[in-house]
Amino acid sequence: MKTCSRLSAVFFILTTLVFALPVRAADPLPSWSDTASKQAIVAFVSRVTQEGSPGYVPRAERIATFDNDGCLWSEQPAYFQLFFAIDRVKALAPEHPEWKTQEPFASVLKGDLKSVLAGGERAILELVMATHAGYTTEEFAKISRQWLATARHPTTGRLYTEMVYQPMLELLEYLRANEFKTFIVSGGGIEFLRVFAEEVYGVPPEQVIGSSIRTKFALRDGVPVIERLPEMNFIDDKAGKPVAINHHIGRRPIAAFGNSDGDLQMLQWTTAGDGPRFALYVHHTDAVREWAYDRESHIGRLDRGLDEARRKGWTVVDMERDWKLIYPPLQ
Amino acid sequence: MKTCSRLSAVFFILTTLVFALPVRAADPLPSWSDTASKQAIVAFVSRVTQEGSPGYVPRAERIATFDNDGCLWSEQPAYFQLFFAIDRVKALAPEHPEWKTQEPFASVLKGDLKSVLAGGERAILELVMATHAGYTTEEFAKISRQWLATARHPTTGRLYTEMVYQPMLELLEYLRANEFKTFIVSGGGIEFLRVFAEEVYGVPPEQVIGSSIRTKFALRDGVPVIERLPEMNFIDDKAGKPVAINHHIGRRPIAAFGNSDGDLQMLQWTTAGDGPRFALYVHHTDAVREWAYDRESHIGRLDRGLDEARRKGWTVVDMERDWKLIYPPLQ
């Protein structure tokens, strides 16, 4: 019996260790301070994952949607995709001598970001069309990938993909560990996002939703390609977000995360469903480690949303208080 | 030692049983005859799932797309969704006295399917708009669900969801068991498909792609809804299929399944990628158990596709020879 007992003992110890691991495992949200925001997240996840409880939500219905700009990565002093467009204008300028005198290209080439932004949506749309269309989807992915691997943010000097929020990376992972399916629902370009969403956020291309230009299937010398056309297809912002969620996902999320009035309808749509619902706004309150802006900002304005969040008891993250860390440590 | 040995013996037997199960498990494609089509499917799946082999495809890239009408369920004597529209016209007729004299509604109300079909795409579009728009997404899902639960096919008397192809159900399941992600890419309506795709095909709403009408987010007495508008958004057929795949999935499938010329571009796009690729056409050759049609049919015409399949060595399922069973046995 001795060998048997010893084996049993070893088995017992191993089993105990294995089963004890999840209990002893580190806090899944280590960059979150232990404030109301974190407590609300953990309480919601516990509630919907506890089988047999009245708030239990089957795995297939655990859909969580995240805005990108200002929610998963920074968006100041301008949307990062605009910096991409600007760099592309500079790269393409030799082929477009007319841009020297034509706005918004002339301001871009002079490095005058303020004048570019003063041109409003129309100027930005022109920049996007001139730099995002005219390629096959594969050519465009390659150009985007090269830029993301090398371009650096004007004030932090980081790669743009190093300006993602560490607490939000942990949140994405925490939700997936609890068998949520995480989606990005961004006003940014869908094909630009897909280039880095899988590697940086762990979100596969089929779970990325964004704004898009029209595309067209064509045979080039018998080889099928998809060409990007200089024409808007869909703007995934404001009331466009629930429309896109319904179109791509076909289910109402049970949790939604945003940071601006552009996310308000997504949060309204999400919280209007039956059963437990969760809505969270990231409030940019940290002028030292990131940026502080809300009601008056041209980028990521949070005004109506902030009022509605308070009225409805949505979770509002105070970046300065609630987040121990903003960006992942550089390796 | 005796108890220990006995325990070990029991353990050994149990373990052997558990590990032997997959080997002894029944054929995953029992309704497929052991012909070239089945062999090609199994060879492809073995190839892409064998780790370390040159044809190995990582799990995340195992995307398979399926047409619906004529590929996963029957489509004769007319697309099933058209029967839905026809039944809806009849149900709504009391509110529309003008339909008695207005085509294509008048023919519908007279039960004259031939005249309806003779009206071509325009007539069908009118029927779709009159019956699919004007509801919230939730109202429409409810109407569709009720119809699918009760309406019966004019010649077989089966529920429409009982006219799905048993061999294709097995194929979907076989691919998923091999960690493929299965998508539907249909010319049919995306929101109509989603009502039954999960239950009948095991394909969740977020993996259903189809044609769509425009929708709009609105607040009705403060309650957010998505309204269906009488305006086409996207026709997911022919060159629209690769465009929609690129838009929704953002990856090129490695396997695609169709039955008509409307699927040709999807199959071209799929097979033009690098590495192992698989394309399959279901050829309707069984006039006794289902229907026989191809080059001359107005519904599900397979003409150019059949030539290209033969030229390129794609798998062409001969329904009569390759399928032991067409529909699942009625319970």
Image (cartoon, coloured by chain):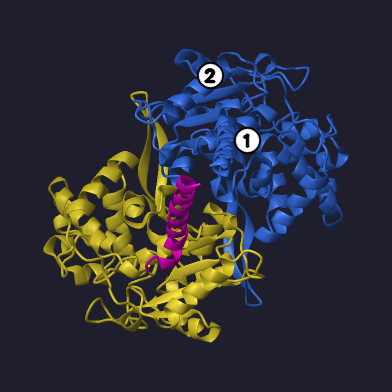
Chain colours: A yellow, B blue
Comparing B211 with B94, the one in front is B211
Q: Check disc 2 and give the amino acid type.
A: Thr
Return the x and y of residue B265 as percentages of the image width and height: 48, 30
Choose the circle earlier in sequence order: 2 or 1.
1
Which residue type carries mark 1? Asn
Helix, strand or loop at mark 2: strand
How many C-alpha atoms fall within 10 Å of the one at disc 2: few (<14), some, or many (≥20)? many
Give the main secondary structure, helix, strand or loop, of the magenta stretch: helix
User: Residue tagged by mark 1?
Assistant: B68
Q: In this view, does A185 lie above or below B318?
A: below
B196 falls in the magenta region: no
Residue A228 location in percent, x, y?
A: 36, 44
Work out whether A150 lies above or below A34.
above
Label 2 marks a residue whose chain is B
Report which quarter residue A89 is drawn in.
Answer: bottom left
Which residues are drawn in magenta? A1-26
From this viewpoint, is residue B71 visible? Answer: no
Residue nearest the observer in this picture, B149 or A97 = B149
- As helix, strand or loop, the secondary structure at mark 1 comes to loop
> Where's residue A134, x and y in %?
30, 43
Q: Determine if the magenta segment contains residue A12.
A: yes
Task: Using residue A80 as the reference point, say whether residue B197 is left or right of it.
Answer: right
Asked whether A309 or A88 is in front, the reply is A309
Q: What residue is pinned by disc 2?
A: B315
Residue at image position (73%, 32%) is B78
- Residue at screen point 85% across, 54% down: B97
